[in-house]
Image (cartoon, helix red, strand yellow):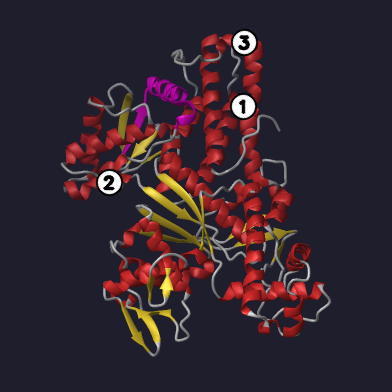
Amino acid sequence: MTDVYDLAGLKASLEEAAAAVIGAPVAGAELSVPPRPELGDLSANAALVGARVAQRPPRELAAEIARTWAEGAGCEVCERYEIAGPGFLNLFLSPAWYGGALQRMLDRGAAYGGDVLPAAERRRVNIEFVSVNPTGPLHVGHARYASYGDALCRLSAFAGHDVTREFYVNDWGTQMVKFGQSLAARYAQRLGVEMPVPADGYQGEYLLDLADQLRGEVGERYLDAVREAAPDAGRLPADVVDAVRYWGRDRVLDQFRGTLEQLRVPFDVWTSESTLYDGPGEHRGFRGEVGKALAQMDAEGLLYDEEGAVWLRTTQYGDDKDRVLIRQTGESTYFLSDIAYHRDKLDRGFEHLIDIWGADHHGYVARMKAAFTALPPHDPDALELIIGQLVNLLESGEQKRMSKRRGDIVTIDDLVEAIGVDAARFFLVGRSHDSTLDLDIGLAVEESSKNPVYYVQYAHARICSILRNVRERAPETVPQPAASLPEVPIEAAEKALIKALSRFPLVVLDATRRRAPHRMHTYLGELAAEFHGFYRVCRVLADDPAVSTFRTGLCLATRQTLATGLDLLGVGAPDAM
C-alpha cells in the first residue's frame, strides 16, 4: 500500500484516487503548499488537470476525488478537505501525518530522499562533461560546467540511475597542432631562439611555465629543430610538434585532474580522442573506433563521395545539410571523431548518454543528433545534449573577461583561492544551466544571510550546536534508533518545517528528471529559512521532555536533509561556523 506519510507517497495516493474516479491516469497532477495556512496544508490540482478527460466540472470532480481518497488511503491522515476556486482540493492533514512523516525521515536516515526513481525509469547513464582541449588551465566557465555536471551525476545516482562520469579529452586535430607549435615556440624562446608564438596560437603566459618544465625534462633535444625552423613555428617538423604537444597534453591533463579534484569533481573514465584512431581493422584509411564507425555507416548506405570528400547523409535524420566526415586532404573532421566516440559509448553498454556542452556548441546540436540517429539502434532519445551558458565573474561590480588563447583568464584555481570550494560549487549551480550566471566574488565571501551558501551552511552548523547542547544537558530526549517519536501537539512552525522536509524526495526527483541541480540549490535555501523560523519560536529543550524529544528529532532530520542536499551539490556541511 502507498505510504501516505511520505509526501511522494501521498501524492501517488491522490493520483490513484483520481485515476479511479476518472477511469484513466492523471498526467500533470501536482501538490503545492497554499499561500496561507487557513487554506490547508497541501493543495492538489488533480481535478483541474483531469476534468477534460473525465468531461466533468472540476469542482464536482474534485469533491469525488476527495471523498474517494479520504475514505481510502487518506483515512488515517486526512482531518478534513475543502474544494476551493475552480477546482483545487485543499487538504488539512492530521497531527498523525506530521508525526508519521518525521518518523519516516528519521528511520531512513542518510538514505532519505534517495532511490526515488521508479524502476522503469532507471538507466545505465553516461554523463560526459567539461571535455575541453588540454591546451591550458581550466577557467571559470569550465568551473560552471564541472559543478553542474558533477551535481547532476550526484543527483542522478542518488535518485537511482547507474551513472558513469566521463571526461572526453579533445587531443586530436587543428587546435592541438596549434598548441604544440605554441609550446614549441615558447621552448625555443627559453633556449634563446627567436620564434614568436603563431598569431592564431596560444598566447597565454602559462605556456612559459610549461616550456620551463619541458626544457628541464628534455634539455636541448629539440634545439636543432627549432633553430632550423625559426622564426616560423609553422615550419617545425611534424614529429617534433607531435612530441611537444603530447608532452604538453599530459602535463595539462595532470593540472586538470588536480584542479578538478580540488573542486570535488571526480571522473570514472578519461577517454582521449586520439585513441579512437588506434586499434585493429581499417576502413577508408582509418583504424580503431573511427574505422569501425565508418564501416558501420557504409554498411547502412549512409556515406557517399563527392568533390573528393566523404559525406554523411545527415539530412535523412533531420539535419539541414549533409556533413563532411573526411576532407579532400584525407583528414578527418571533428564530426567523425564525435560519431566514433558516441558509437563507442553505445558499445560499452550505456542505455542513455548525456553530453554537457558549452554555449559555443549550440549550432552543433542538430547535426550531432542526426548523426547519432544514423547509428544503430537509430534511437535519437538515447542521446541528450545539454547546452550550458556562460558565467560572468564580477569583482567590484566589474565583469572580468576571459580568453584561454590570449591567456587573459581567471582559472578555477584562482576562483577557489578567492572564495573557497563550497562557495564556488554552490554559486555555480545557483541558476539554470541555460541562463547566464553572474558570480559576485564579494557576496560569495560575505558572512551574512545575504550569502546563500553561508545561510544554508549556518543552518546546519546551528543545528549541530543545538544537538551538542541537547546531548550535554538532556541526553534522554535524543530519539533513539528504531524508537517511535512521542505524540505531542505540533506548532505551526514545526508543521511548516516538516512539510519543507517532506518535499526533499520530490525535489531530488524533479531535479534529476529536469537536469536541474539549481532546484536543489533553491530548495536548500527554503529549508534553511524554515528551520531559522522554527528556531525563533520553538525551544528545543522544552519543559515537557516529550516535546523536547520530538523537536530534537526534527532537528536531526533537518540536519541530515541539509547535509545530504549540500553533498548532492558538492558542498560541505560544517559542524560549526
Q: Is residue 399 left or right of residue 90?
A: right
Q: In this view, does 74 lie to the left or right of 368?
A: left
Residue 94 is one of the magenta-drawn residues: yes
Instruction: Give the farthest residue toward the bottom.
Output: 307
Q: Give the structural element (helix, strand or loop) at label 1.
A: helix
Magenta range: 89-112
Residue 18 is one of the magenta-drawn residues: no
Q: Which of marks 2 and 3 is in front?
A: 3
- Mark 3 vs 1, N-terminal side: 1
- Depicted 193 relative to depicted 547: above or below: below
Q: Give the structural element (helix, strand or loop) at label 2.
A: helix
Q: In which quarter of the image is the C terminus?
A: top right
Is the residue under label 1 in contact with that under label 2 (CB below 8 Å)?
no
Is the residue under label 3 in contact with that under label 2 (CB below 8 Å)?
no
Question: Amino acid under label 3?
Answer: Ala
Name the residue carrying label 3. Answer: 474
Q: In this view, does 205 lie to the left or right of 559?
A: right
Of residue 384 and residue 573, the one placed in the foreground of this image is: 384
Q: Alpha-carbon neighbours of circle 3 within 10 Å: few (<14), some, or many (≥20)?
A: some
Q: What is the C-alpha distance between the residues marked 2 and 3? A: 50 Å
Question: Amino acid under label 2?
Answer: Leu
Q: What is the C-alpha distance between the residues marked 3 and 1? A: 16 Å
Name the residue carrying label 2. Answer: 48
Residue found 66% across the figure and 13% down from its top: 472
Q: Can residue 543 be seen in this view?
A: no
Q: Which of marks 2 and 1 is in front?
A: 1
- Mark 2 vs 3, N-terminal side: 2
Is the residue under label 1 in contact with that under label 3 (CB below 8 Å)?
no
Name the residue carrying label 1. Answer: 463
